[in-house]
Amino acid sequence: MNTPTATSERPSIAIVGGGIAGLSAAFHLQSRFRVTLFEAQSKLGGHTDTHEFDIDGAVRAVDSGFIVFCRRYYPHFSAMLEQLAVPSQATTMSFSAHNLHSGVMYNATSLNRLFCQRRNLVSPRFYRMLLDLVRFYTRAPAVLKTDDHQTSVADYLRQHHYSTAFSDDHLLPMISALWSATPQRVAEFPIRHLVEFLHNHGMMNLWQRPDWEVVKGGSERYVDALREQLDCHLQTGSEVRRIERQPEGVQLETDAHQSRFDAVVIATHADQALILLADPSPAEQSILSAIPFESNHVLVHQDESVMPPLKSAWACWNTEVPNDVHPQSQYCCTAHYWMNELQGLEMAENVFVSLNSRDQIDASKVLAERHYSHPIFSAQSVTAIRQLPEINGRQRTAYAGAFWGWGFHEDGARSGWQAAQQIERMFR
């Protein structure tokens, strides 16, 4: 472990990656260090992605990446918004599910909408789902009292005799949409990792739901505020190709030049970080290689046909279980976000954000297209994530990224703050 030598001049810190984690690290380091942030893309923000469209005669800001946050469960991100004086507004997180294979459809917003499909009133399968739903949210927190990081969601459901109605029509579609992963993939999540997330986000309480908010005018408003207020050198469109740690400093190589810094914060995905390192330690090689990512296709559009056939089933967050026997179907994470409701867009026309639904959407109604990468959580990757302290703060390097938590915006904001704390310790 190299210990940097203190000097009278402010130490120079490179941050590689301009998503929420890198921006959070810069925000917390700027007062004491000379910070240079490198971002390969032409804009900052990562999954913070706001589009502006002319709809109903006015410019509308529509988010397709990061959308909602909760002040109670997003303390680091919320504190940053407060300091930046970025306004927000209340939203709802209503949830619906539609299983195209079984035909089951419901909206969890109210009792009437829960039974929007009237046949569910006399469906034993549906009542079994509801009973298992209450049982899961009541009893699953018990796993937090154990040290079990291996049992998967699928194994837990099987061991405790949960019905296929609960798993296929509620839990797996819901967590599939949360993590933009296939139902098969999320079934392999460690049950403890899932319950920790649900518990820490107030989602295990069926009767008292937390208050959610959106950034007023689109999520990128906080990125705009950071760009204006950060006291650091922002280099967008500057892709770092190589990071070499040396006893006396860290050398970064881009297409344009080489630069030397006193330390570096690597705020990229784990697989990208491993590629950048010229000399990964055995621990870095082992940990970073164990955290894979996968890409998801996203469309912003105005095609209402993807929404549940019953208007009373429409919610902010609409999950869909595809009919996997259809020859055109790909069994993947499919979800549709009703942005008018989520962002409080007061307009006659509807706008949606859909995951992995290209073959369902009329191309003439598409407004924007994106691909986002998300972490894959398994027993192996969660174990690697828990080993972060073994590499963080060593060789003049700190790590940041939402994937070091559960992959959400608060995880990125918190990890950026934690990386800043590591850098502070290096130069005490």
Image (cartoon, helix red, strand yellow):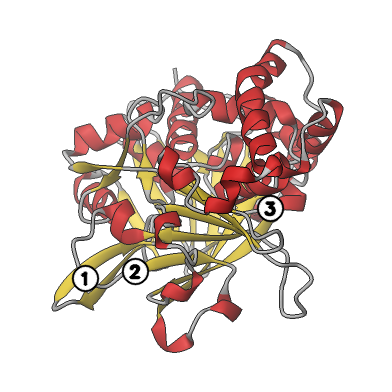
Q: Quadrant of the N terminus?
A: top right
Mark 3: secondary structure? helix
Determine the residue positioned at 80% across, 29% down.
156
Q: Nearer the viewer, residue 215 or 404?
A: 215
Residue for point 21% across, 43% down: 89
Q: Is 180 on the left or on the right of 210, as rendered?
A: right
Q: Classify residue 301 as left or right of residue 90.
A: right
**Between residues 292 and 419, which one lies in front from this camera angle?**
292
> Which of labels 2 and 3 is toward the front?
2
> Where residue 271 is drawn, which disc sits there?
3
Q: Spatial distance from mark 1 to mark 3, Cα to Cα?
A: 43 Å
Q: In terms of image quadrants, where is residue 100?
A: bottom right
Q: Position of residue 228 (x, y in %)?
A: 19, 51
Residue 346 spot, x, y in % from top left: 18, 61
Q: Position of residue 292 (x, y in %)?
A: 72, 51
State which tag comes first along the sequence, 2 or 3: 3
Looking at this rendering, what residue extends furthest in the left direction? 57
Q: Is residue 31 visible?
A: no
Indicate left or right for 283 with 388 as reference. Answer: right
Q: Are marks 2 and 3 in contact (CB under 8 Å)?
A: no
- Front position among marks 2 and 1: 1
Sequence-wise first label, 1 or 3: 3
Q: Which residue is mark 1?
A: 348
The quadrant in which residue 180 appears is: bottom right
Q: What element does badge 1 sit on?
A: loop
Residue 154 visible:
yes
Q: In this figure, which residue is indicated by the disc labeled 2?
A: 351
In this view, the residue in front, 332 or 8, is 332
